[in-house]
Image: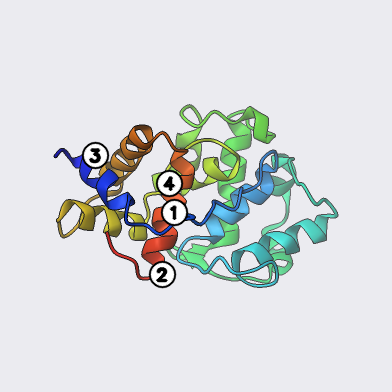
Amino acid sequence: MDEVDKVVAAVEHIPKPWNKFPGGYPDQIEAALIDAVFSIRSKYGSETTGVRAVVRRYCDAIGDPKPDQLDRLASMDTGRLTRVLQNAQAVSGRSKAEAVQEAARNLVEAGVHRAADLDPARHRPAYTRVHGLGKVTWAYFCMLLGHQGVKADTWVMRWVAQALGEDSINSARANALVQGAAQKLKVDATQLDHAIWAHARAGGTA
């Protein structure tokens, strides 16, 4: 049995119906970027708590329920953004608000102004050169905008390692194996990733 088949076999033990991917923010690039960065080592929460509440506060403050103008986020004063979001969490020694704005500025400079402008392969360097932001959250950012992908975070890596009978694996390998399993199972890779994540986070094993 090859590695993808081992993952496929383990997927069969995840109880159905699977937890569905919430759907993200198609055509809302500002909301997706804030969510992707503030989700780092954070609880997702409900509409009034956690990451989702941070996004809602931003939308309320700018008076736009579907924010898709990245220039607006990039140009906002960082102090004001921090006050609006009511969240001073840090990533790699700096505020997440600062990381969001640097990523927004980099993407705008690369020609990304709205969700429709984003090319996941071409624009990734503009995001990942921000200190504290990497390939995993980039994949998640793209998923939030409706692109197929896998967010191979700690939970997913741990579960895939268990499926293989190994102690640990890296995110790139976990990503490839989940993508391969999705192809064999003929399911949406994003949905499979979310099902694995939710199962592992709830204490489920492979």
How far apart are the two marked residues, 2 and 3, measured between alpha carbons? 23 Å
Estimate the spatial distance between the alpha carbons at disc 1 and disc 3, rounded to whole Å.
17 Å
Q: Is residue 176 left or right of residue 57?
A: left
Q: Residues within 10 Å of mark 1 (few under 14, many from 20)?
A: many
> Amino acid under label 2?
Ala
Name the N-terminal-most of marks 2 and 4. 4
Along the horizontal axis of the image, is 64 left or right of 201? right
**Residue type at the position of mark 3:** Val
Upstream in sequence: badge 1 or badge 2: 1
Q: Residue at x 46, y 49 (%)?
A: 137
| Residue under the point 37% across and 50% down | 152
How far apart are labels 1 and 2 at the CA level?
11 Å
Work out which residue is located at the far right of the displayed protein and give it.
63
Residue 173 seen in the current view? yes
Which residue was labeled with disc 1?
195
Secondary structure at numbered mark 4: helix
Vertical arrangement, residue 57 with respect to residue 174, above or below = below
Q: For mark 4, what is the residue?
A: 192
Q: Disc 2 designates what residue?
A: 202
Residue type for callout 1: Ala
The Cα atoms of the two marked residues, 2 and 4, are separated by 15 Å
- Numbered circles on residues, count: 4
* C-alpha separation, residue under disc 1 versus residue under disc 4: 5 Å
* Residue denoted by label 3: 4
Q: Residue drawn at (68%, 47%), measured in percent from left and top?
A: 30
The image quadrant of residue 183 is: top left
